[in-house]
Amino acid sequence: MSAWITRHLQTLIGALGRLSEQKLATLLTTLVIGIALALPACLHLLIANAQTATGNWNRAVDLSVYMKIPTSIDEVRRIAERLRQRRDVNDVEVLTADEALKEFRRDSGFGSAVDALTGNPLPHSLIVHPKSEYATAAHLEELAGDIRALPSVDLVQLDTAWVNRLQAILEAVRRAVFLTAAFLAVGVMAIVGNTIRLDIQNRRAEIEVTKLVGGSDAFVRRPFLYSGFWYGVGGAVIAWLLTTIVVGVLREPVSRIAGLYGSGFTVSGLGLQPTLILLGSGVFLGWLGSYIAASRHLREIEPS
Amino acid sequence: MIRFDHVFKRYPNGREALSDLSLELASGEIAFLTGHSGAGKSSLLKLIALIERPSRGQVIVNGQNVGSVPRSKIPAYRRQIGVVFQDHKLLHDRTIFDNIALPLIIAGIGTKEIGKRVRAALDQVGLLGREQSRPLELSTGEQQRVGIARAVVSKPPILIADEPTGNLDPDLSLEVMNIFRRFNEVGVTVLIASHDLYLLEQFPVRRIRLEGGKIVDSDEAPQKLLDPARLMENRKP
């Protein structure tokens, strides 16, 4: 058993040593694998970050409540007080009709037109800030429904439509990422497989001799599998580096954009779990690619 | 130990290398396989090493019917046969030690035991101390001895050699032959294909002469061997 482990370790290290003998070729192959793995990793980050960002914006969604005309300002304040008691409401602002008109006159540029009016056509209104933990689309709809049911409420505006649209777009992108990842996985296997095939051709004599002295298929295949393993590890490490560079370059400008929109959003990099998945996929694809190539091409080499 | 029973070997190109060949080699026997090139010597050895399979007839080696060994069992089958090649077939990017250790590594033997056995095999072929050399740093004769050490390091019951002295001068040939003889003395069945007439003269062992894929002469020469030292003397004029 210990001899077996020793052999495997020797083959593992031996495969690494052999790869390091041809630095440029190994580097190029690993780089190609790294880029192929970095693409889905970056797209994954795009989605993860977009989700965080829209999550933030969801939290910023307020409800605008327009009261019926006429509703007394006391009634409006009473409703506001009642809404504040709800556990899913953080705060309620009261905007009286007069304040609303003043604001409109100032911001709209229709000042003179407003002056021409005899009365105030605007209703009193409330701005309801939901608590962040209740800021999901379903909860917001429920809250809006409750408020809408109040007799003196005329209209409740809740703009979750664009959030839903963005979510739908993200879902489509996620599928595209999945497909891209699948294609690139096949690509990685093809790259590793082809490299291993060339390696097998170059080591033909060695393989023949090993088979002649009784080396089994598994024994002959082992060093190639470990080569594939190392290609996968190397590719995953390069992919991780590339993703980290991308995140580092984008973090500052994206934060600036978010700041302009009044959000504290920052781009986050690959967490521990995605990093492990990246490494695992690299190792698995490298191993599988070399396994397929080795099984196929080692069979063709028989001593003569 | 080795039995051929009406064996035919025809290659895909139509050439018939062996034709109705029957042969028996007892356990612990040593024999020369002679004949012109193309007589079928190599084909016969390839059937024993299971590099080729017979077209017809049976080859029984160490109690196994070679023709019916499945592909997956070929490695295990080959481990009981040591093969020495005319061109040595050493791996030039590895040390002598690693070359000889290969069959033991394949057999899954522990590192310490491998060291012991490799040195013992090197000692038997007179190359102790050259473990860390590379094959190309050695002379042809030394390389051939490394090839022999690799063939016997895992102590196979059968040793076959295809023109092992083909590239060697007469002195080296005798030396190599004496190594084979010593293995035979400890019970290894040895079959050597050779057309080295001088060598055949010096070693009065059984000769199996092939011609056109058939055995034309299989004399049971006395197996008593001359003292190697006297052999060397005899050669001097």
Image (cartoon, coloured by chain):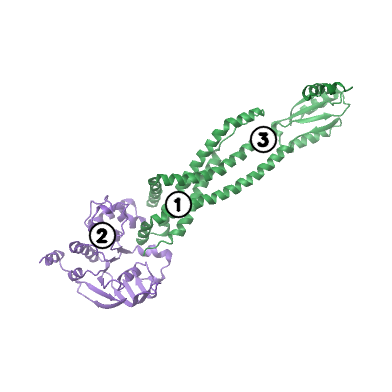
Chain colours: A green, B purple
For the residues beneath circles 2 and 3, the answer to whether they share a chain is no
CA separation in Å, label 2 and label 1: 34 Å
Along the viewing direction, whichever of A14 and A255 lies nearer the viewer: A255
* Chain of the residue on which disc 3 is drawn: A
Task: Specify which label sits upstream in the sequence, 3 or 1.
Answer: 3
Specify the quadrant of the image occupied by residue B43. Answer: bottom left
Residue for badge 3: A55
> What is the crowding at mark 2: few (fewer than 14 residues within 10 Å), some, or many (at least 20)?
many
Residue in view at x 66 percent, y 44 percent: A171
Q: Position of residue A233 (x, y in %)?
A: 47, 45
Residue A242 in the figure: left or right of residue B170: right
Residue A57 in the figure: left or right of residue A205: right
Residue B184 in the figure: left or right of residue B78: left
What residue type is disc 1 on? Thr
Residue for badge 2: B144
For the residues beneath circles 3 and 1, the answer to whether they share a chain is yes
Secondary structure at badge 2 equals helix
Task: Tell me the tag on residue A195.
Answer: 1
Residue in view at x 64 percent, y 36 percent: A52
CA separation in Å, label 3 and label 1: 44 Å
What residue type is disc 2 on? Gln
